[in-house]
Amino acid sequence: MKIDDNFFMKLAIDEAWKYQLLTYPNPAVGCVIVKDGKLLAIEAHKEAGTPHAEVNALKTAFLTQNKNSLLKTLTNSSEIHDFLIKNHNGFFSDCEIYTTLEPCNHVGKTPSCANLLSILKPKRVIVGSIDTNKIASCGIKTLENANINLTTKVLEKECDNILIPFKAWQNKTCIFFKMAQTLNGMIDGAVSSQRAKLYVHMLRDKIDLLMIGGNSVRIDKPILDSRYVKGKNPDIMIYSKTKHFNENISLFKVPNRKVIISDDLFKLLDYKFVMVEGVYNLLDILKDKIDFLILIVSPKIRAGINANNDLNIDFEIVHENYLGDEKIVFLKKRDNK
């Protein structure tokens, strides 16, 4: 049977995007395993410190043929590695493994995926992006030394797009903008569903700083915490020339975090991972500083404040997926040079 590498890599790409940003400071990665043309696993890396995408996929694939295996109870990456090394019995020798990023070659909070694959000896490993991180790179070389058949740079651009946040926060302050709107572009009032709000709280748990405009604070009186996921509450920067705010507004009452009131954008550089929650005016101010934009589109048409027609920015859609009924669109500024 002829295998369509692009088809299976696209499955891995879509799975990786489901966990985009939630793996900070690690990259989002997806992995698919196919055995004799049959799809066995679609998995992703879900959170830093937990098993990588390849390990989750290897576990899922193995359990398709060994449903009552002790492996089912294992969640620690090192334990899964050890179990598979001792009990694989050649199971993966006719498997093809698709991964959006070159398997890691170093031992950190989790063992090396490249080393594990070199022992399991799959039929073939198909890689999307080549890892440019000097610490984790050279996994391909490890696989080549184990005489494993390799295909690289499959849907490379699409896989590289997954790494936009990772490459940003590796080298500088990563700043992304989150905005919610209805189908007709209405941006005021309650736009998002509870599920979308939960997703935003998951993002807040990962970031170091949340920036919001002063008018939004005065009008909406938000809390800006991550209570839905019981996560950490990021520091807040209120972008405002006016320093006076009502101290009874909820965001000022959240303990163990710093609230900055300033119109000095250089203060963003004191943090590594920054999310901006706002609409068009703030987007215009930050358009040359953000790395990407997340647009949450609710399937509603509502009366209310609409687009700022004076704003002109061209974006490229790098991925779209769904959160329940709502569409999440990931965009980066288009290079018009």
Image (cartoon, grey):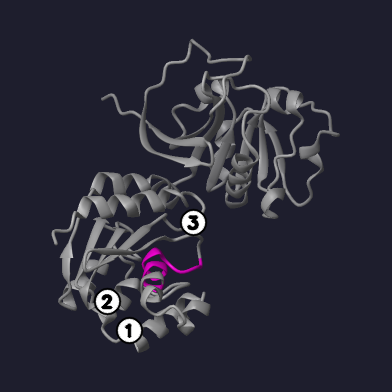
Q: Which residue is mark 3?
A: 23
- Indicate the position of residue 305 as horizontal and vertical percent values: 61, 15
Could you give the CA–CA distance between mark 3 and mark 2, rounded to whole angstroms? 27 Å
Please state if 14 lies on the left or on the right of 279 as rendered: left
Disc 1 residue type?
Answer: His
Q: Are marks 1 and 2 in contact (CB under 8 Å)?
A: yes
The span picked out in magenta is 49-59
The answer to whether one can see residue 153 in this image is no
Mark closer to the observer (1, 3): 1
Q: Amino acid at mark 3?
A: Thr
Q: Is residue 56 above or below residue 198?
A: below
Q: Amino acid at mark 2?
A: Phe
Q: Is residue 74 left or right of residue 267?
A: left
Identity of the residue drawn at 77% across and 30% down:
221
- Residue 120 in view here: yes
Q: Residues within 10 Å of mark 3 (few under 14, many from 20)?
A: many
What residue does disc 1 label? Answer: 88
Q: Is residue 258 above or below residue 85?
A: above
Q: Is residue 16 left or right of residue 4?
A: right
Q: Earlier in the sequence, mark 1 or mark 3?
A: 3
Q: Position of residue 219 (x, y in %)?
A: 75, 23
**Residue highlighted by disc 2:** 92
Question: In the current view of this chain or complex, which residue is farthest to the bottom?
Answer: 86
